[in-house]
Amino acid sequence: MKRPIAIMDGNEAAAYVAHKTNEVCAIYPITPSSPMGELSDEWSSLGKQNLWGTVPLVVELQSEGGVSGAVHGALQTGALTTTFTASQGLLLMIPNMYKIAGELTATVFHVTARSLACQAVSIFGDHSDVMACRATGFAFLCSASVQEAMDMALVAQAATLEARVPFLHFFDGFRTSHEVQKIILLSDAEIRALIDDELVLAHRARSMNPEQPVLRGSTQNPDVYFQCRETVNAFYDRTPDIVQRAMDQLAQVSGRAYHLFDYAGAPDAERVVVLMGSGAEAALEAVEFLQAQGEKVGVLRVHLFRPFAARHFLAALPKTLKALAVLDRTKEPGAAGEPLYQDVLTVLGEAQQNGALPFAARPRVIGGRYGLSSKEFTPGMVKAVFDELAKHQPKNHFTVGINDDVTHTSLSCDPHFITESDQVTRAMFFGLGADGTVGANKNTIKIIGQETDLFTQGYFVYDSKKSGSRTVSHLRFGPDPIRSTYLVQAANFIGCHQFNFLEKTDVLKFAAPGAVFLLNSPYSLDETWARLPRKVQQQVIDKQLKFYVIDAYQVAQATGMGTRINTIMQTCFFAISGVLPKDEAIEKIKGTIKKTYGRKGEDVVRKNYEAVDQTLANLHEWKVPAQATSRLEMPLPVSAAAPDYVRNVLARIMADEGDELPVSAMPVDGTFPTGTTQWEKRNVSLSVPAWDAKTCIQCGACALVCPHACIRMKTVPAAALTLAPQGFASAPVKGKDQADQRYILQIAVEDCTGCALCIQSCPAKHKEHVSLRAINMTDKDPLLARERANFSFFLGLPENDRTTLDMTSVRDVQFLQPLFEFSGACGGCGETPYVKIVSQLFGDRMIVANATGCSSIYGGNLPTTPWATNKDGRGPSWSNSLFEDNAEFGFGFSLTIKKHREFAGELLKQLAGDVGETLVSEILGACQQSEAELQQQRQRVAALKDKLAANRKPAARNLLSICDHLVKRSVWIMGGDGWAYDIGYGGLDHVLASGADVNVLVLDTEVYSNTGGQMSKATPLGAVAKFAAGGKRMNKKDLSMLAIGYGSVYVAKVAFGANPRQTLRALTEADAYHGPSLIIAYSHCIAHGYDLVNGLRQQKLAVDSGHWPLFRYNPDLKQHGQNPLVLDSKKPTVPLQDYIYNEMRYKMLTHSQPEAAKLLLAQGQAFVNERWALYEKMAAATPAAGG
Amino acid sequence: MNLTTKYMGLVLKNPIVASASPLSESVGGIRRLEEAGAAAVVLFSLFEEQLQLEATALEQHLEEGTESFAEALTYFPKVGDYRVGPEQYLELLHQASQQVQIPIIGSLNGISSKGWIEYARKRQDAGAQGIELNLYYIPTDPKMSALAVEKHKVEVVQAVKAAVTVPVAVKLSPYFTSMASLARKLKRAGADALVLFNRFYQPDFDIEELTVSPTLHLSTAEEIRLPLCWIAILRGQLRISLAATTGVETSAEVVKYLLAGADVVMTTSALLRHGPGHIATLLSGLQQWMEAKEYKSVKQMRGAMSQKNVADPAAFERANYIKILEKYKQEYSLKA
């Protein structure tokens, strides 16, 4: 019987079993595990049933801590319950994991193993998170591949029910969770065969039930706690055999045999590596290759890590073993060795002690680390380990895969040791996120996997920018199962879907000799060749590549596909590669198109069909000449003027050479210089704004709304422009007494993402052509060189004097230098304008606590970071602690400020004789509200430092170390709604209640944006989000009213697109307020589902419809007998539907559930009306005397 | 008294048809129109561009930003079953045709021949008993001749007729050099009925914002004269069903249109102003008039005052123009 195959990734494979074998799934989004929860939710919403014929309940909690509590509760009351998580999320579950295990409760947690946040956050894979849970009492079962993720999910579920020991089933984040493979699907009958209903009934029978009440979770004393803890031993002793029995049962029904430890390689191997996870697949590939060359090597792949089954472990190793290398994908600084290594040593030591060692002599054991944060782990690295084992004195506690030039732990690897099989098609595709390359490749894998007997593999590498991001797809197709759990090393097909990548990326670095090179080029065939950089031409010639060219954008344009070239490039691949007969392939592509886009309308399908047909007519092969003729050199990634660190380190990361950087190039504590995005000229947009000085009314709106701080304003004396480059635009300053001043609006065209928000913001219209404004989009190419020179000149012009500017004037604030620039945020981002404004207002004395999320990614993801400094070297100091603790983290800043200001005051008084009474009293008595006052205080502190510099008294040295605190600091606690409304709410509430002088900026996109659109408590009624596919049924939490309830918190709701002046007033009042301030900022977002060029219009509609009323609540007003609540927007004038139905998050419900949409709209409108009435009443009330 | 009438082959219980409006956007709304006495309902118009735009927007906005960033490979949940414009429309058409007794006429506003045919056929399959083609097109290209404009319309009608078996009505604007000639061409192309007239929605200027703003105002009884005139002219010259639309505010307009020669009288603005119940008011007004004037049937009334049947056919032609101008001059010279 032919078994059903499926094309899926590891997340889907594990979730497939979890959903079928559980009744409750409690989840919280975290990368890379989120898709498991999302799929479960999707399946339940489609009515998919579990083994027992009921649809599992899927619920989203406010944090992983919350999830683990809910899981514990559901388990205790008898439901088969599971969860999915990773990294910090798993860490938050640890307390409950001890409880669940201590109470011998059957459950499986499915974990996409991921790095932990240490010196930095990483979303990628290693076993650090899992290893942090070793002591909880969970059993650990590891999967190394997508097929195993499905099989072991079932083995774990079967085993936990019998053993009563809870299981942590884990597989490598991204490498397995996101790798797409062709696998054999477990049928319901096969799953059924392993799940014993008697054990399910026994699980339920142990549940809390008032009909047979019990008490669980008592408090114990020294007399019995210890004994109680030892009661579980027998359960752990039995577990390995139970797991093996489940594996044997699986083998019986599926034919796939697994063991607790699976050995492969030479039966008489002398050198063996031990490891678990996806790396074991690459190791197996290396072992097979070396064994074929006669080497006596083997690999022991660990499935059951805990309980560690010593007997099985020893039995699995060949008796001829002489040397063993234990590889851990984690790091425990300060430990005697990493966890697996230590376990192996213990087992061997005990066996030797007991005389039970099954080898002639005790083998030498070394341990090493590999693959942290998804670092590549290749057969070449495995060979390096075997080579090391062969040495007389092999290195212990080694690393492999990096160059450790500091403590010299690393093994050197041969980059030319490649085991890729010629029977396998290996393809690499370089695309833009926006061009659909990855989606098309996923389709290709499906077509080949489903229509042929070939095995398939797809792995996708994304960059960390959210605009203009590059994707690299790695695809393999071959006749045997593909175990190459590493990126393609020698591609025989390379597709470059963007011509300009050739200047930035070494696209052909991994091209095998004789490979196909397919290029999407906007030029004719001849011109394309001529325009290739010399290096690329030479590579094509040297490697004897077959070179194909298509103008995919032209085909897309002609067939109504716009800029989506996915179908076109996919068709090219099939037409050239010959993986399938061409006609058959075309037919299959069309079939997939129908399936994928069918429900989106026939027009979409038709356009895709036309694109397929047109592709074949426009695809050409270029006869490669014998000589390279190009004079184009690949430009340096950064300017030669960049600082050393940028040129030597960050530029190499930009050029995809980060893997080659040695340990010595890295900071020891995660500290990086700020202001580095200015060196990464990404040039992601072909069209940019151009300023029309004559039409401009100099209002500053365009500069204010620019999400990437690409529009800058200055006024300078006319004389300052004497040496301006040709074509440098300026205009007379509008206003009184400014006759000799010139106004400049300069655009950083190389940093612009082309979002066009600036154009939408411009109120000025050209007199003769009303379609033109004072700022208009235009092609970048013709003005690139000129504007590059202009921007450089502009930066050299003096900054406006901060003391002369009104910090609540939209125009004036734009003359302040942004200290947050050129971030990696999405084009048209609705969050970054707020962040930028805050940096303009307070950046030179600002310290930022940033919750994990979009703002920590665009704010702090390497290679370059956007937080910048002014000419004096001052600027925001930024840090990200975690997701859940951000308010407390920022609160900690305020504690230091408070203490150190106080201490500095005490020391100042002590040292009055040394530094002068006058200076002391001036410093301590200084008012620091206005810019002028702040500048004066800075001068005083500078004078103080001069006086202290030579003073060796301990008090003086102490004062010198903290006197910077005497200049007023502005603490900003920033994050998204997922943090503020959900996971961090408890902490936020406490900090707001503390009275601390901190400013909280909530960038409210009303959804978890960074992890892909999951519902938060900020999601409005009726909006569709992940976990709210049927539209959210509860109202958005009114965070502002909760804070207002304290009466002592400054609270404002702002929307810069609706009323920028009100935003500025709120921000400046928040900073001035001596206590906690909370600003909730409406942030339009890509997850709202509309073209963000309309973001400002939507902000206005959000306000005018009453969805987002603007107000400020200032407790200080009470002291003046005024009502603290000031409404800044008018009574709703626009029906709610006129706002919400411009956004797909609401609109899609009218397509999927029209009746529900209607009902939710009516409820939403009623809620808006009620809330407005309440606010109006509050704002009209007469305040109690005296506040 | 016999109120029945025949419109493009459909036998209707009376001559009042609810034309395309938001009132027919739901099955409940259609049912209310039927209960109020409407003899048929023209379903609200779907614009071909709108359908394409909606499908494209849905696809684009659900996919925007996907597969670009490792943490957010998608932004929206997959929804098992959702429908875009044409499917929802067809579902409504299907449901309505099942749940009401009166005929439902599907309305379509198109631009491409392909679009016309595809969407017309789907309307028929979903249960429409007739199709109304709304040929609203403003030829702004100076190189496009009047003949070419007419030819395009004729081709659309031919193509749709070839694709469907239910009767096809054509809704026209009044601005043609030779309206009668075009009407004849359309009949020859297979049109079963003409709906006179479509109203132009010329945009206005917002002089504060310097923008062009779309405007829509409901028609008034004042506006009936142009269609009244052309129905009266065409009735008797062409054997084709005629539907009068625009300006039906009271039963007086219904009577006028029937006398001019309309087979049915369509109304929207009055229903939007007064609600679906206004149909009953129109019908009772018609009946009262017929009683008073001793008309036994609508058939008897139809075309009684068409150009052919009036005592002074010149009233519809140039002579009337002269007469009006003379009257105007007299009035104003006296005042002066």
Image (cartoon, coloured by chain):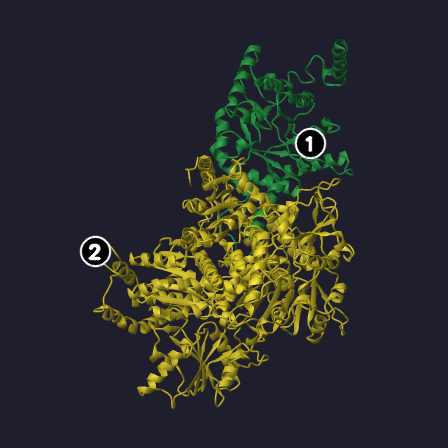
Chain colours: A yellow, B green
Tell which subunit mark 2 falls on.
A
Q: CA distance from mark 2 to mark 1?
A: 84 Å
Are tags 2 and 1 found on a single chain?
no
Q: Say which of marks 2 and 1 sits in front.
A: 2
In this orientation, does residue A639 appear?
yes
Q: Which residue is mark 2?
A: A212
Image spot of residue A15 (x, y percent): 42, 61
At numbered mark 2, what does the secondary structure look like: helix, strand or loop? loop
Q: Which residue is mark 1?
A: B186
Image spot of residue B138 (x, y percent): 70, 35
Packing grade of label 2 (10 A; few <14, some 14-19, many >=20) is few
Side (left or right) of B221 relative to B144: left
Amino acid bearing label 2: Gln
Q: Find residue A934 and report its image quarter.
A: bottom right
Q: Residue at x 50, y 35 (%)?
A: B26
Tell which subunit mark 1 falls on.
B
Please report contact status of discs 2 and 1: CB closer than 8 Å, yes or no: no
Amino acid bearing label 1: Leu
- Say above or below: B2 vs B41: above
